[in-house]
Amino acid sequence: MTDIQYSTASFLHSALRSSEQLVYLTSATFGTDWEYTLHSHSFAEVFFVTSGEGIFCANDAEVPIHENSLVLINPGTPHTERSCGPVPLTYTIMGIDNLFFQFLDNVEFRFHAYALEEYGVTVIPIMNLMLEELQNRQQSSLQICQHYLSVFFLKVQRIIGDRLAL
């Protein structure tokens, strides 16, 4: 698996003001060496497919995902993903502490997948700006990423509408 990860755990956490904290931001490509296994986290995850197609698995459900699919995963939800198709699954994942999604169209869901289709051009640049900030680790990078995270969720809520509450 090709993996680029920038952890925020070691710098500037004391400067955060909001309750939600970005734990990590990862950009990865599902390689031939990737073994998918169910796992869970103590924090929420935001999973956005930038290319390829695959299957997202959680809670005995298998959901097809493809370019511009957004998957929101609540803490403690066992999940994994796998690539299928000729183009490897490439995605960006954000781990976010102190966040729980409320899926208003089905309150029992621990995760939800959304096909954002034409809205990828809205959210991908925000994630890329966050990746760039964390990669460069300049002064105030984490604070800037926290603001981008707020903008990301505002944009997602605008796209999804009243089906999601944060």
Image (cartoon, rainbow, N blue to C red):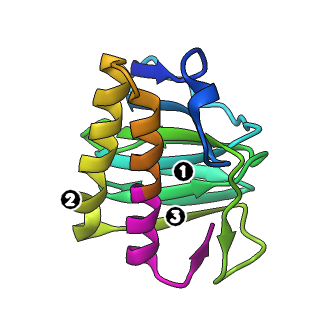
Counting other residues with Cα less than 10 Å from the Cα at mark 3, is it few (<14), some (14-19), or many (20 or more)? some
Residue for badge 2: 121
Give residue 113's mark: 3
* Residue 5 at x, y percent in the picture: 44, 21
Q: Residue 6 lies in magenta, yes or no?
A: no
Residue 154 seen from this side: yes
Task: Determine the main secondary structure of the stretch shown in magenta.
Answer: helix
| Gap between marks 3 and 1 measured at Cα | 9 Å
State the extent of the magenta-drawn residues as a range.
151-166
* Residue 165 at x, y percent in the picture: 62, 73
Q: Are marks 3 and 1 in contact (CB under 8 Å)?
A: yes
Q: Circle 1 sits in a helix, a strand or a loop, which is it?
A: strand
Question: 24 or 90: nearer the eye?
Answer: 24
The quadrant in which residue 14 appears is top right
Counting other residues with Cα less than 10 Å from the Cα at mark 1, is it few (<14), some (14-19), or many (20 or more)? some
Upstream in sequence: badge 3 or badge 2:
3
* Residue 61 at x, y percent in the picture: 66, 59
Task: Single out the mark in the foreground, 3 or 2.
Answer: 2
Which amino acid type corresponds to the residue marked 2 in the rendered image? Answer: Val
